[in-house]
Structure formats: structure tokens, C-alpha cells
């Protein structure tokens, strides 16, 4: 996965801080939807293998598999556990109220899994970027 960025400063160990502009759902025409309530510029650390200098426009790359696995973990897993919890309780013959309770307990379980994964991920490797051009 590649994105355009601007080098903001150089860091030790051949690293650089880059500013990435987050694209919007409205096609960067914020006057049409006024939904841009979040910061549109994100800062990230990237491996500076081409010796880019502050102020230069660069293209950064990240491993697509890491981005997709993070998206699946955040968006798909909670929904799947929610449905599986309801289905399992239903198959075991639980009344509807209990099925709903079990599904929400599974949703809570997915939140616990996400928090633990995030803590472990912050200690290990996060999504890494590299300046490629």
C-alpha cells in the first residue's frame, strides 16, 4: 500500500517523520458534506532509505497484509463473534433473551481481544512505513 507524504524532519537511524494527508469520504471537497471533524494530517515514522530531506514530497509504502489484518481484526472479528455467539446459544436451545445476552458477551470478548492485541502490538512491531521514492 502506498501513500503520498511530506518529510517533516529527520530522525536517527535512517528514519524520518512524515506527514500523511488523510483522504476524506467526500473526495476532499469538505464544503459538500462538512464531515471532516477529525485531524486530516497524520504523522508517522518511516524508514528513510533514499535520504529524503525535510520538505520533500515522497511516496511511502507499507506491507498491505499488515494493514488488511488490522482492518479485519477491528471491523470483521467483532461482527463475527457477535453472530457466532447468538447462533451458538440458539443452537443450544437458549431462549431469545439469553441468545441476545450471549451475543453481546461475545461482542465484549472481541473488545477484550482487541485491547490485548493492541497492547501486545505496541510492544512489538507496528505497521512500518518505508520511503520508496
Image (cartoon, rainbow, N blue to C red):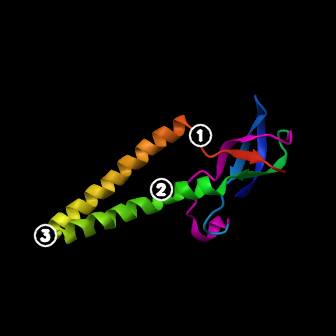
Q: Residues within 10 Å of mark 3 (few under 14, many from 20)?
A: few
Which quadrant of the figure has residue 25?
Answer: bottom right
Marks 1/2: CA–CA distance: 16 Å
Q: Considering the numbered disc 2 on the image, is that residue within a helix, a strand or a loop?
A: helix
Give x and y (percent) for residue 24: 63, 63
Is 82 on the left or on the right of 71, as rendered?
Answer: left
Q: Residues within 10 Å of mark 2 (few under 14, many from 20)?
A: some
Towards the viewer: 89 or 12: 89
Residue contact between numbered discs 3 and 2, judged by CB atoms under 8 Å: no
| Image vertical order of residue 123 relative to residue 97, above or below | above
Q: Is residue 29 magenta?
A: yes
Q: Which residue is mark 2?
A: 73
Q: Residue furthest top?
A: 12
Q: Is residue 71 visible?
A: yes
Give x and y (percent) for residue 21: 69, 54
Residue at the image point whose x is 83% and y is 50% from the top? 57
Is 25 on the left or on the right of 120, as rendered?
Answer: right
Specify start and end residues of the magenta stretch as a single range: 28-52
Q: Residues within 10 Å of mark 1 (few under 14, many from 20)?
A: few
Q: Which residue is mark 3?
A: 95
Q: Earlier in the sequence, mark 1 or mark 3?
A: 3
Q: Which residue is mark 1?
A: 125
Give x and y (percent) for residue 125: 59, 40
Which quadrant of the figure has residue 116?
Answer: top left
Towards the viewer: 42 or 98: 98
Q: Earlier in the sequence, mark 1 or mark 2?
A: 2
Marks 1/3: CA–CA distance: 44 Å
Q: Is residue 58 magenta?
A: no
Give x and y (percent) for residue 28: 68, 65
Amino acid at each position: 500500500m502506498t501513500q503520498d507524504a511530506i518529510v517533516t524532519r529527520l530522525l536517527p537511524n535512517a528514519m524520518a517523520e512524515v506527514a500523511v494527508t488523510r483522504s476524506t469520504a467526500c473526495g476532499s471537497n469538505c464544503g459538500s458534506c462538512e464531515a471532516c471533524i477529525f485531524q486530516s494530517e497524520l504523522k508517522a515514522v518511516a524508514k528513510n532509505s533514499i535520504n529524503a530531506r525535510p520538505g520533500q514530497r515522497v511516496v511511502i509504502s507499507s506491507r498491505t497484509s499488515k494493514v488488511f489484518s488490522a482492518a479485519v481484526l477491528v471491523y470483521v472479528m467483532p461482527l463475527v463473534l457477535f453472530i457466532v455467539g447468538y447462533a451458538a446459544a440458539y443452537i443450544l436451545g437458549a431462549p431469545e433473551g439469553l441468545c441476545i445476552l450471549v451475543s453481546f458477551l461475545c461482542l465484549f470478548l472481541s473488545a477484550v481481544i482487541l485491547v490485548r492485541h493492541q497492547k501486545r502490538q505496541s510492544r512489538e512491531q507496528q505497521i512500518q512505513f518505508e520511503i520508496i521514492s
